[in-house]
Amino acid sequence: MTARLRLLPALGLVAVLGASAPLAAQGADSPVAPGYWEYKVSVLGIPASTEKRCVTPSEMDRFFPEICTRRFTCKYPVKRVGNGKIALKGVWIDKKQREAPVEASGTYARERFDLDVSMKTIHGLPLAGKLAARRLGECPAPAA
């Protein structure tokens, strides 16, 4: 399997966000609102995945703008968020400690954000994708 194909599922999981961010430490102060979110990811212009996730106010410190996947540890030494725009530059590190440089930029509002993501795979191949996220409303009630 090529490195590009191995990375497609990882980009499809961009919706699963990790790490803490002082910017979003208070749910109400976050640039985006807690609630039920839908993410649509496309890679090289091809739809790759759609996911939904409930984000509670207490999870906001791990939600935006620390965008990451389950498969990587993400570090963004360059992070600019303000006036409806976001720009991130850093690395994604896999479980074998290999680094893949990544840059993401786009726009956000309280109930949506759209990012263009470009990176080099751990093998140096360029890869581009888009993440369109929108808040669907309040989190559904837990099943009884």
Image (cartoon, grey):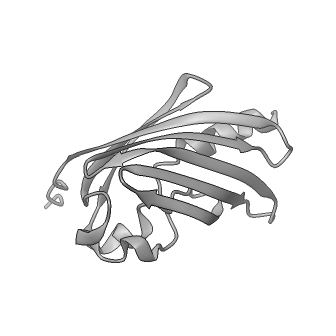
**Which image quadrant is residue 35 in?**
bottom left
Q: Quadrant of the C terminus?
A: bottom left
Q: Viewed as shown, does residue 33 lie left or right of 114?
A: left
Given residues 116 and 50, the one toward you in this image is 116
Residue situated furthest right in the rendering: 123
Q: Quadrant of residue 77?
A: bottom right
From the image, which quarter does the N terminus lie in?
top right
Which residue appears farthest toward the top when viewing the image?
Answer: 46
20 relative position to 77: left or right: left
* Residue that appears at 57% across and 58% down: 70
Residue plotted at (71% across, 35% down): 127
Q: Position of residue 71 (x, y in %)?
A: 63, 57
In-front residue for pair 33/69: 33
- In percent of the image, x 30 and y 76: which residue is there? 26
Residue 129 place in picture, x, y as percent: 59, 34
Picture layout, residue 82 above or below residue 125: below
39 relative position to 89: left or right = left
